[in-house]
Every structure is written in C-alpha cells, then in structure tokens.
Image (cartoon, rainbow, N blue to C red):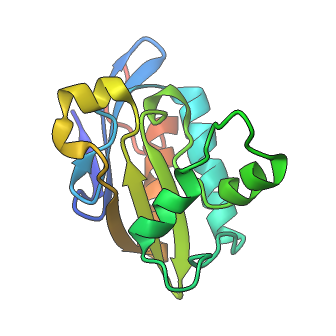
Amino acid sequence: MTVLLGDKNRFAAEVGEWEHSLRRVDLWAAGQWLTCDDNMAFVGQFRSDVVDTVAWLRSGAGSALPFDGLSPEATHRRLTERAGAEDETEEEYRFRSQFRVLSWGPTTDNVSAHLFRDADRLVLTLQFPREEHLARHPEHAGKVFVTQVPTEEFVGILEDLAAVLDGSQDLGRP
C-alpha cells in the first residue's frame, strides 16, 4: 500500500513498502521525480531530517531571493556555481547553506535544491548535478526546475510524511 501526499507538479511525497529498516519514499517537485537514483530511505534518519525541516520553516527561517533582479533559476545557478570548489570560502558555504533544502541523506543527495520565501509561498529550485544522472537523463543537463508551493501546504506535506514514517498514519508496516 502506498500513500501520496501533495501534488507532484508542486511538491509531493509518496511513501510505499518497507524493506527491513528502509522504506520506499519517492519525492516529486516541479513535475520531476527527485528520488529517481535512490528511493529507499533509512526511516529513522530521513524522518528526523524531515522534522528538522518542518521546525526550521515553522521558526520563520528561510530568506527571500538574495540577489536583486535575478530569477529563481539564475539565483540557483549563482548559488551552486562555486559549490564544492577547492577554494570555496567558509563564508560562501554558510551563505549558500542558508538556502539549501531537501538535504535528507542519500535519498536526496542527487538533487541540488534551494528554498526561498516569497510572502506566504516558498519557491523551490532544483537541479540534478550528477554526471551519472545526466548520462541517463540528458534532457536534465543544465536545467533548473522551479516550483512554488504555499508554505502551509509544504509544511503540511512534511508533517504528514513524518507521521506516515513514524507509524502515526499506518500503511501496513511488516
């Protein structure tokens, strides 16, 4: 049995079967399947990361687009252009990190994602940077996907996801 939370064209999580301490979790945003490289989540850590994101958003954290005049796509590219560079400074890393989202372990580490607040909405930007992924999906090369989600909708999806993962909304754990 599976459950779909949200709208795949904005943001959604689909939770499926258990396999030992792992559970299938498929994430979608902007119509893209984000967990296409690894959709088996270690439930304890994944749930903890989701709950931390909810707390972060509920605290009011998150900032507007940081660069005047740049689109969300251009902002994403600017934030990622020096990511992981040998000479990236601690200041650059900290600045970029304040916008990072969906950093939920191996299940999501194939996606570079940023979140920006825009009044009562969130703007998510996403990109698939791995060469292995781009070899399988050449149409994703250089593409930044963008979606907007009402903040309360996004937080609600994450809260429901955490509830499903901890068994508060049972889907038939073995």
Q: Residue at x 43, y 71 (%)?
A: 72
The quarter of the displayed image where residue 12 is located: bottom left
Residue 133 in sight here: yes
In the depicted structure, whether residue 36 falls above or below residue 101: above
> Which residue corresponds to the image point at 80% horizontal and 46% vertical from the top-left?
89
Which percent across, then down, holds residue 13? 34, 48
In the displayed structure image, the side of residue 115 where residue 16 appears, left or right: left
Q: Residue furthest right?
A: 90
Say which of 78 and 55 sits in front. 78
Q: Residue at x 42, y 33 (%)?
A: 110
Residue 4 or 118: which is nearer the viewer?
118
Residue furthest to the front in view is: 87
Q: Position of residue 17 (x, y in %)?
A: 29, 25
The answer to whether residue 39 is visible is no
Q: Quadrant of the C terminus?
A: top left
Q: For the view shown, which residue lies furthest in the top direction? A: 20
Whole-percent x, y for residue 150 in the image: 42, 77
Viewer-proximal residue among 69 and 149: 69
Q: Is residue 45 above or below residue 14?
A: above
Number of residue marks: 0
Residue at x-position 59% and y-position 54%: 100
Compared with residue 76, is residue 52 higher up or lower down, i.e. above or below? above
Residue 82, x across and y down, in percent? 61, 47
> Which is more toward the observer, 93 or 47?
93
Q: Quadrant of the N terminus?
A: top left
